[in-house]
């Protein structure tokens, strides 16, 4: 199973697990009158009032018909809510797979529950709401008695449960009754960014720790394995002793294993803190997405060169292996402290956003920690080429100030905006599934 327990639950009660706790009987349902239901109630009152004053039987008949429909929706909706209210605490839905790439779809699996009794005109719906810590939300509404269908998640992030509920409503949407479903305290879905075909040029400044073990010769019980000499072989591997004692006057080279490539470790960090003066909440989420995309592309490129690449973000855990999962966690939020840094020998590259103040951010605490980040340290302040001039000016100022630190090389780097994934919605808005 994917490691979805790294990130902590929300502090504002979003994922505290209190609502919908197993074994807890939901409260009695209360009708929630929609604007359309209130409007029909006003029409009913007006029809009866005008029909009574003007002695218009047709208006009174229309009012009676509307009142019958309105009452049917209210009474039978309440009855259905009473029948199904205990099922909210037993229902459970799983998402499969739980790790995807932005733009992919997941299946909603109905794991626990019971059959639902049906009445004409009364609908039963489940609403799954997933939200990241920085306010990015995706919704999926479906009938629990039917296949839920795929849920497409267009934007990167670690998604938690936020307001999952079981709802009973009428076909006209006059009334609704709902109860919260069981919540999970850990992230339910990790959506990693899509790497670019070509990322930032990376040139680590140090040589790294190299492991050259030399040529390993293949030995059997008697002697080292040999093969006939082929033009182009290294002359230093010719066994001259075998040539001098042989009778065929043929050259043989000692068969050896290939030499292992140099081995080094390189650390890539994403600074998730955004300046509220330069970035709005939505723009901050998009900017952190750009950092994660560039970090993922950079990490995979260095891994293709034979390096051991570690990836992470300020305030989070440093990971080895595939960086895609590590780049799903960062959120556009201030962090309380720097990441716990491992021991690396090649250096550190930090991807950050421009800022208007220095000295109090997680990046400053990271550079001032003891022991400091693995040196040499490169800090890249990224900004989009089509962004406001104020952000470019702030990036150049940050590069000059942070570059004055000892053993730190800092630069402002313009990048192109990543093309939108097909089906992408505006950050912060909902992506509905099957509508009621």
Image: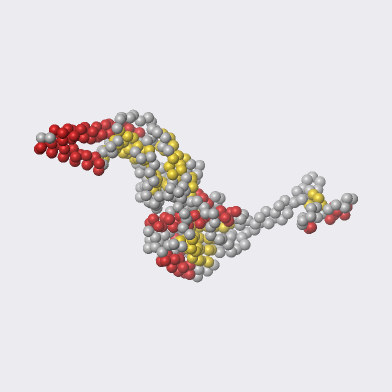
Image colouring: secondary structure
Residue drawn at x 81%, y 48% is 223
Q: How many discs mark residues in the rendered view?
A: 0
Q: Quadrant of residue 238?
A: bottom right
| Between 35 and 57, the one nearer to me in the picture | 57
| Between 160 and 127, the one nearer to me in the picture | 127
For the question of whether residue 355 can be seen, the reply is no
Q: Quadrant of residue 306?
A: bottom right
Residue drawn at x 87%, y 54% is 244
Residue 356 horizontal side relative to residue 198, left or right: left
x, y percent for residue 297: 53, 55
Residue drawn at x 53%, y 57% is 199
Residue drawn at x 55%, y 63% is 375
x, y percent for residue 5: 46, 46
x, y percent for residue 276: 38, 61
x, y percent for residue 203: 58, 62
| Between 50 and 432, the one nearer to me in the picture | 50
| Between 133 and 295, the one nearer to me in the picture | 295
Q: Quarter holding the C terminus?
A: top left
For the question of whether residue 70 can be seen, the reply is yes
Position of 28 relative to 370 (above/below): above
């Amino acid at each position: 199973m994917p490691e979805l327990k790294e990130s902590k639950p929300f502090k504002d009660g979003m994922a505290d697990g209190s609502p919908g706790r197993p074994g807890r009987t939901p409260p009695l349902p209360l009708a929630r009158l929609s604007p359309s239901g209130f409007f029909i109630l006003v029409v009913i009152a007006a029809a009866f009032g005008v029909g009574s004053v003007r002695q218009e039987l047709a208006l009174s008949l229309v009012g009676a018909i509307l009142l019958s429909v309105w009452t049917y929706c209210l009474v039978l909706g309440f009855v259905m809510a009473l029948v199904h209210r205990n099922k909210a605490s037993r229902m459970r839905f799983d998402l499969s797979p739980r790790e995807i790439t932005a733009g992919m779809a997941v299946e909603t699996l109905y794991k626990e529950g019971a059959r639902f009794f049906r009445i004409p005109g009364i609908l039963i719906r489940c609403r799954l709401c997933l939200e990241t810590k920085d306010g990015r939300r995706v919704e999926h509404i479906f009938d629990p008695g039917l296949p839920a269908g795929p849920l497409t998640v267009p934007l990167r992030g670690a998604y938690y449960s936020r307001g999952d509920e079981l709802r009973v409503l009428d076909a006209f949407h006059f009334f609704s009754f709902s109860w919260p479903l069981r919540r999970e305290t850990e992230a339910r879905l990790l959506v990693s960014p899509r790497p670019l075909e070509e990322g930032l040029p990376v040139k680590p400044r140090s040589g790294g720790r190299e492991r050259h073990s030399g040529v390993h010769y293949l030995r059997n019980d008697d002697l080292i394995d040999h093969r006939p000499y082929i033009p182009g072989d290294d002359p230093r591997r010719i066994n001259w002793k075998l040539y001098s004692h042989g009778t065929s006057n043929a050259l043989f080279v000692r068969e050896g294993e290939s030499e292992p490539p140099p081995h080094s470790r390189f650390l890539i960090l994403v600074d998730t803190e955004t300046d509220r003066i330069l970035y709005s909440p939505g723009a901050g989420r998009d900017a952190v997405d750009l950092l994660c995309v560039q970090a993922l592309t950079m990490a995979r490129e260095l891994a293709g060169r034979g390096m051991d690449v570690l990836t992470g973000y300020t305030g989070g855990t440093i990971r080895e292996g595939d960086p895609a999962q590590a780049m799903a966690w960062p959120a556009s939020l201030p962090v309380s402290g720097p990441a716990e840094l491992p021991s690396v020998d090649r250096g550190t590259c930090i991807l950050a956003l421009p800022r208007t103040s220095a000295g109090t951010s997680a990046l400053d605490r990271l550079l001032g920690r003891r022991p400091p980040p693995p040196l040499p340290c490169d800090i890249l302040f990224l900004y989009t080429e089509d962004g406001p001039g104020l952000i470019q000016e702030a990036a150049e100022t940050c590069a000059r100030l942070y570059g004055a630190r000892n053993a730190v090389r800092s630069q402002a780097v313009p990048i192109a905006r990543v093309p939108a994934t097909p089906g992408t919605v505006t950050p912060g808005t909902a992506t509905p599934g099957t509508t009621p």
